[in-house]
Amino acid sequence: MKNIFKYLVLIAASLLIVYSCNEDKIDENEFGSLKGKVVASGSNEPLPNTKISTNPVSSTVFTDSSGNFIIESLLVGEYAVEAKKDGYLADFTPATVEGNRTSTVVFELLVSTFNNRPPSAPELLTPEDNEVLQGIEVIFSWESVDPEDDPITYTLELRNLDNNEVTLFEEITDSTLTYSPLTLGTKYVWQVTATDDINVPVTSELSAFEVAPPPVDNRILFVRKINDNNVIFSADEDGEEFQLTSSEVNSYRPRRNVRANKIAYLQNDGSNVDIYIMDRDGLNKRKITGPVKPNGFNLEEIDIDWPEDRVSIYYPRFDKLYRVQYNGLGTVELYQTPDGSLISQVVVSETSDLIVLKTNNLQGYDAKIYLINEAGAVIDTVLEDVDGAVGGLDLSIDDQKVLYSYDVSGFENEDYRQLDTRLFVYDRTTMETTDVSDNKPEGTIDIDPLFSPNEASIIFTNTSNDGLSRRDVLLLDPANQDSREVIHEDAFMPDWQ
């Protein structure tokens, strides 16, 4: 019995030893390690600072400068390992971790734009192929679409075919570009390249256009609104038009001087307005006013004058009248209103020292038209003590007739809206005033009148009194008021010399 008990004790002890040894062996094999490397697909360039994580979750590590990583003390088992880095597509790979061993994985990450598609080749819209431009400004426009809506950057190449000169416009983010001045009578070709900074750039087909030669006898000037800016055009008596100023700036109130072969005009930038001059073809633009700039109650309502036989341009600045030589020299104050009223418009006689002025208050009303001489003495009064807007001013060559516009409704408001503005001719000899707008359509206004060069007609602007509709330039024979004729559509502020 004692021997049986001894044997049982020995067997139990042996089993305890074996069990203890097996427990130690399982502990030693429970953990393993995982190491790996991350490179860029294709180039095999190491990718440092790549985030490495596992599922089931363990420690999160980042690759070193050589793209290597290691995760220690991982429980044995199956894992999904993720590599993630900005600019690259995340990637997963399976890994088996064994006890007391180091498993190895390698990642080849694709850039995040791997499947990205390039934008479409630009389609050139304007100017049309082989178009002839009537002006020194061109508005380029094109169209390109990116399948992933990636931002597109453009480069436009413009080649002058006469001298083979190439002008590059780079880093364009819009699909339009306005450029001036072009060379008159010249042919150009242009092309646009588009890139999304991911794929290989794509290029449009070539397109050609031509700039018309300088206008020979464009005696009529007018203004047209483009891109919310006033733009000056010239035209011949057959209606052929030529653009003189850029649609990127606000230019208006053109006045041509035939003897100087120049055009003076106003150009404003925000709250400032200056007098500029340019050649008849729109070239050689330059500012001639300095600190003493034109100004008044409304910058678009003030006007200038440049008599044929004078080197000076006359202009208002609040309650004062100035003149400046067209070379920018010799700014002189000529007159100041005695009652502080503002001068808005001026016409200077070509044959005497007479000057016609239109004055008004700060709101544009309480208007008066009167004549002074160079010494500032009042010679004659044409209109005063009336309600409503008064504007548009001209003087006949013999100084006997004054042309102007007046809103006979007498309406006044803060927007300077006009309801029934008509054209009038005041005869200084008979002291009679004639309404020459009898056949004006109801609900419209006649403004900005001038005598034609032979004074047989009046050129002026007609538009709806809503202040929003299109404006047109018309011609009228005062002796035949049925002769009202539209000569330029979508046009205003005419001049005819």
Image (spheres, rainbow, N blue to C red):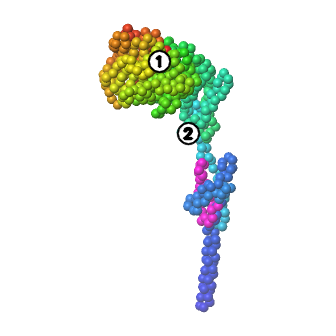
Q: What span is colored magenta in the figure? A: 70-96
Q: Which mark is residue 495?
A: 1
Q: Is residue 253 magenta?
A: no
Task: Locate residue 315, reporting x and y percent.
Answer: 46, 25
- Residue 103 appears left or right of 57: right
Instruction: Quadrant for residue 389, please give it.
Output: top left
Residue type at the position of mark 2: Pro
Q: Is residue 457 above or below residue 13?
A: above
Task: Locate residue 207, reporting x and y percent.
Answer: 61, 24
Task: Locate residue 225, reporting x and y percent.
Answer: 46, 25
Residue at the image point whose x is 54% and y is 15% from the top: 259
Q: Is residue 455 above or below residue 233?
A: above
Marks 1 and 2, Cα distance to the nearest angstrom? 46 Å
Q: Compare marks 1 and 2 and give the one earlier in the sequence.
A: 2
Tell me the crowding category of disc 2: few under 14, some 14 to 19, or many 20 or more residues within 10 angstroms, Cα based. Answer: few
Q: Main secondary structure of the magenta part?
A: strand
113 or 15: nearer the viewer: 113
